[in-house]
Structure formats: structure tokens, C-alpha cells
Image (cartoon, grey):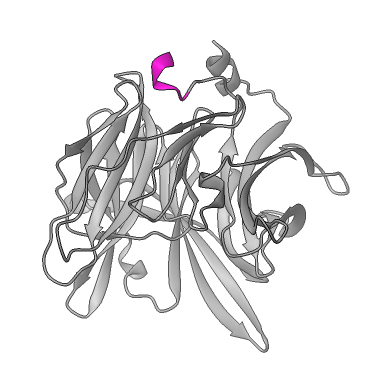
Amino acid sequence: MNLSNSMHNKFSSFTSIVFKRTILKDSSDGKQVSLSLLNLCNNASDGEHLHSVVQEFSVPPPMGLASSLEIADYCDGIICLNTEKASDRAALYNPSIKELNFLPKTCLLPPPYVKYAYHVGFGYDSKAKDYKVVRIACSISHGEHPTRGEIYTLSSNFWREIKTNFSTLLYSTIGSSLYFKGVYYWYAFKKELEHHKEFIISFDMSEELFHHTSLPDRFHGASGCYIRLVALKESIAVMTGLSHRRGCEVAKTFEVWGMEGFGAGHKELWIKYFTVGPLEGIEYPLVFWKSDEFLAATYDLSAVSYNVCTQTFNYLPIHGTQEDLQTVVYMNSIVSVNPRQQ
């Protein structure tokens, strides 16, 4: 009941955002991963305060001390934390009730002389009414080695291996993956002769099946181009960024594309929603928190909100110490991440 009320509260005047960042502690502690909860006013007009800091909380050790810690994704008030190392265990964390659940160790250990890159996704299976974590192991060693997958269910509290049907590599940069409405998405590529061909690999949490979706042809092989996955207009969209040199400054232009059905030959039909920029001082986009406004990280690792319609910036009181800012649109919940409570 609490979760349903939070999800359907359409009259709230604020949107809550959780920022993951690394902050410097004293010399004895070094760096610490911190989560900052910020409320952004949905109806702020010119001259009004857009934000109010609500809460700061540190991720419990040892997860909070891992330099490669990232937010794999978020669902129903639960944040999935992950590191790049297979030896480190992923965790589910509900900061509202300060509950942390370290997941069992992976069962996808590589064979001798093979090196894996691990990619984690998190979401909800509405049919089984269960939270799931999916992990993909892609070989980055020389030679042909199959991509492997495993899935963790909160109710069972263990991993089991699942079949994969693709051999593409997944990107592991900020914003290259996304959970949305029961499906997890990764930005992926496959080497074809002398260039890369990009795809979106998706995983249905209920059916436990992988699918792939082609991206617009103009994205392939674009020099200096990168892509972020975002949720926009009740669907997923891709946001591309292209750098331009303007004297001593570097400006970036962003295009936002959404897939709206299928065209001739059942080929994915992509529509360009709008173009933003060129903008100076922006390092990379983070998340759309309104249909016409997105958060971004600046070159000095501050957070800023940019309104597409008014073309105005609003700087937020969030700062990082390295290129690690991540964000999720957040909702408080009392959902337990303890398997014994499921």
C-alpha cells in the first residue's frame, strides 16, 4: 500500500533525485562513496529556488570504500550497487530504511586465461512479484568465448545461470544502461570488419529472455559520438552527444531520439525528438527528470539542470571529486531487501 501510494502520487510538487558521488574524507579514510537526496521543484519559475537538500548518507562499508562502485540501477526505492570486480559482491540497498543486502558471489567465474567484463542490471518481475538482478559476463580476452548470463531472485537468494543468445560487447560507461517498466536495457556494440555496429540489448525480467534492437544508421561509426539511454515520454530514448571545438572551449550538441514502432520490413522506426546545444561546460548528461529538463555533469564535476524550452541552466549544490556522478529519479519506499522478508 505504501509503495502504491508513492508511485501514484501525481500531485507532488517535488521530484526526488539521488546523486551518487565520491567525496574526500580525512587522510585516514581516503575517499568515500556518498548518496545525496535532492528534491527538485516541479513548478519552479524564474527567480525561484529549484532545489532543496533533503539528506546526505554514506554507503555502508565495504561497498562505500570501493573506488569502482556504481549504481547498476534503481527500482521501487531500492538501489542496486555494483563494482567492476567479479570478486566483489553486488548489493541491494534501500536508503529510506537503511537496509543493505549483499548478494551471493557470482557463479560466472571465467575459465583459465579468459578475462570477463561484468555488467549488472536490476528490476522487478511483475508476474512473479519478485525483484531480480541479472549479470552478464562478456569475454574481453583474445579468441572466441561465449557470453554468459546469470540471474538472482530476491525470494530465493541465489544465482542461477541463464542462456544468452548474443555475442555483442556491452558498454560500461555512465548512462549506457537503464531499467524501465519491467525491462532492462544495455547499449552494446559488435565488431564488423573495421567498424562497430551498435545495438540495444534488452532483458525482459518476467520472461527472462534477451532481445536486440538496432539503432539509427547515422549513429554507427560517428567520430566523437557517444550515446546515453534515457527514459522520456513513457518510453526509452537515446541521447547522443557530439563534441565541437570552439576556440579554447569545447561545446557539445545533444540529439534525443525515440523509437516509435516499426517501419518497412519490420525495421525499428526512430524519430528525432529535438536537438540541444551547442552547450559549453557540459561533460555528459545524467537523467531527464522532466520531459523538457535534464540533469548533466559539468567539466568541474558539478551538477546542473538544463531546461530545453527556456535554454537556461540551474546549478545544483552537488559536487564530485572524479568523473563518477550518477543519478536516479528516486521514490521513498519501505520495501525490504532482506530475502527473509519476501
Give the main secondary structure of the magenta stretch. helix
Looking at the image, which is closer to me, 285 or 94? 94
Would you identify the image quadrant in which residue 22 lies?
bottom right
The percent coordinates of residue 35 (x first, y second) are 63, 44
Does residue 94 appear in the picture of this structure?
yes
Looking at the image, which is closer to me, 217 or 113? 113
View extreme (right): residue: 47
Residue ID at (33%, 61%):
216
Range covered by the magenta-colored residues? 337-341
Q: Is residue 209 magenta?
A: no
- Judge left or right: residue 60 versus residue 317: left
View extreme (front): residue: 28
The percent coordinates of residue 221 (x first, y second) are 33, 75
Residue ID at (56%, 19%):
334
The percent coordinates of residue 309 (x first, y second) are 68, 53
- Report the label total: 0
Would you identify the image quadrant in which residue 202 lies?
top left
